[in-house]
Image (cartoon, rainbow, N blue to C red):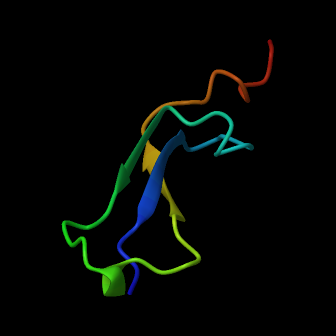
C-alpha cells in the first residue's frame, strides 16, 4: 500500500472539501523506500473536523 498521502481536513457541511480545507498536511508514512510510494501518489484523504464551513454556510 502506498504511504504518500495528502490529508485534507474539512468541516461536516462543506460542499467543496479540497478548496475549503481547514488544514492540509502530507505524509510518507515514515518509510522512504521505493516500494512504499506508488506512481499514483499522492493519494487524497479527507478527514472530518468539527464545526461548519464558513464558505458553504447558508447566508441568513
Residue 57 appears left or right of 33? right
Tell which residue pokes out farthest to the front in this image. 34
Residue for point 64% across, 41% down: 13
Q: Is residue 40 above or below residue 22?
A: below
Find residue 15 and report its horizontal and vertical position in percent: 74, 44
Residue for point 34% across, 87% down: 35
- Residue nearer the viewer, 9 or 53: 9
Find residue 58 and report its horizontal and vertical position in percent: 78, 24
Q: Is residue 33 above or below residue 59?
A: below
Tell which residue pokes out farthest to the left in this image. 30
Residue for point 50% across, 32% down: 22
Q: Is residue 8 above or below residue 57?
A: below
Residue 23 appears left or right of 44? left
Quadrant containing the C terminus in the rendered view = top right
Find residue 30 and report its horizontal and vertical position in percent: 19, 66
Question: In the picture, residue 29 is in which quadrant?
Answer: bottom left
- Residue nearer the viewer, 9 or 25: 25
- Residue nearer the viewer, 15 or 22: 22
Tell which residue pokes out farthest to the right in this image. 59
Question: In the picture, residue 40 is in which quadrant?
Answer: bottom right
Amino acid at each position: 500500500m502506498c504511504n504518500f498521502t495528502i490529508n485534507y481536513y474539512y468541516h461536516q457541511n462543506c460542499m467543496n472539501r479540497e478548496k475549503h480545507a481547514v488544514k492540509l498536511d502530507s505524509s510518507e508514512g515514515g518509510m522512504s523506500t521505493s516500494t512504499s510510494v506508488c506512481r499514483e501518489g499522492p493519494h487524497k484523504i479527507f478527514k472530518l473536523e468539527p464545526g461548519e464551513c464558513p464558505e458553504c454556510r447558508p447566508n441568513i
